[in-house]
Image (tube, rainbow, N blue to C red):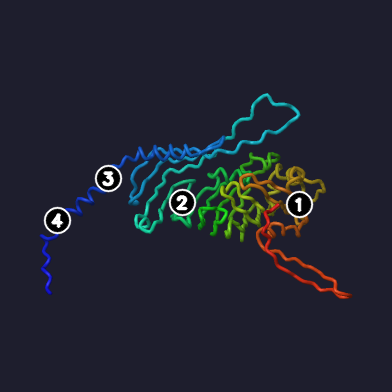
Amino acid sequence: MKFPKLELRHLRWPAYVFAYLFTFVIFAYLSFPYDRLRQYVVSMYNAAQTGPNPDRLEIDSLSWSWHFPGILARGVRLSVGSPEPKPEVTVEASAEEARPPAPQILEASRVYVSLSPLALLTGTRAASFGAKALGGEISGWARDSAALRRLDLQLDGVNPGAVPQLAAAIGLPVSGRLSGHIVLDLPENNLMKAEGSVELAAEDLVLGDGKAKIQGMIALPELHMGAFTLKAGITAGRLKLDECVAQGKDLDLALTGGLRLRKRLEASLAELELKFNFSEKYKGQNDLTKALFGQPDSKIPGLFDTATTGILTKQEDGSYAARLYGAFNHLKPKPLLGGKHSGSSAEKAYGTSTRKRTRRRGKGTEAETDDEDLQQDPE
């Protein structure tokens, strides 16, 4: 059986149809009413927020993106409302009412989102995204289905000080350049069942500004922490720190333990142990630091030791240790009891502990050792 020869004139009408459809799609893509879409997105998001201090979204402009099919937003600002502070009972009644907490603002100069039409054929929503935000660049992709939501996030040169929630959790201003990779799987869109990993590295990390006070008590000069590394695994809604260290010219720091994730990240429960040590050069760099940390050959404690007695424990080697617990956005420090042997409390909550039991049988004894994984919530 011979097929008829295909001549160019036979392709004319299919070419006309293809050219028409292509022109129509491009024209619709470029002339779409993006400003109305911007108003709809902003109004729907803001209307869905509840509580005394609701979040608020602002977008300066919205247009088409070269990442076809996608959109490009400029001047994106997300104002995250802080929870209202609990009123404190004082001996002297204050005539002024408590001021509302200042909103925490996350800003991005450009944000693009590009959808994947092929993923829709399988009933899955998928999109890639990118942003110039927080002093650096953020990129990644997200996939959402009925059973699983997956997020793959890449950070490059982000300034951690531009994230107000992070500074609030630490209690001091922080600056530097943060890069890393975050992979997160959310079964049933539930952060309490999350699986994934976190790998972050920072350069030129600086803590404090010489004005902000630790727990509102004492102000420290800038601390140059240098390089910072964080590696963590997430299993069944528990984030366990595998490595979290910083080594700089002013401070050496180590953090162990983890978080029990909740539906809202800021409400996640922390059980952490912090240990750090100031360098001798930092403690003696000027009259202020000498007064804060005292003279090396003096038995009189410095102001720092006196002011932080209720939140820090000074170790035999001159380092300091504390237990951090509570909600992630309101960490509470507590002296780490037991010195060098107290590091097991965070490990008990997020690792495995060893328990020894001794039984008496007649005149002899028999020792049994069991390994058990603690599943209770941290105290």
Of labels 3 and 4, earlier in sequence is 4
Q: Marks 1 and 2, Cα distance to the nearest angstrom?
A: 40 Å
In this rendering, position of residue 201 left or right of residue 24: right
Q: Say which residue label 4 marks.
A: 13
* Residue 113 coordinates in the image, percent (x, y): 39, 49
Residue type at mark 1 is Lys
Are circles 1 and 2 on residues that touch, CB within 8 Å? Answer: no
Of labels 4 and 1, earlier in sequence is 4
Residue at 64% of width from left, 27% of height from top? 97
Residue at 69% of width from left, 26% of height from top? 94
Q: Is residue 255 above or below residue 353?
A: above
Of labels 1 and 2, earlier in sequence is 2
| Residue 180 seen in this snapshot | no
Q: Say which residue label 2 marks.
A: 138
SS class, disc 1: strand
Residue type at mark 3 is Ala
Are circles 4 and 1 on residues that touch, CB within 8 Å? Answer: no
Comparing marks 3 and 1, which lies closer to the viewer?
Answer: 3
| Residue 163 seen in this snapshot | yes
Quadrant of the drawing holding the N terminus: bottom left
Residue at 79% of width from left, 46% of height from top? 301
* Residue 32 coordinates in the image, percent (x, y): 30, 42
Q: Marks 3 and 1, Cα distance to the nearest angstrom?
A: 67 Å
SS class, disc 4: helix
Residue at 68% of width from left, 39% of height from top? 216
Q: Say which residue label 1 marks.
A: 314
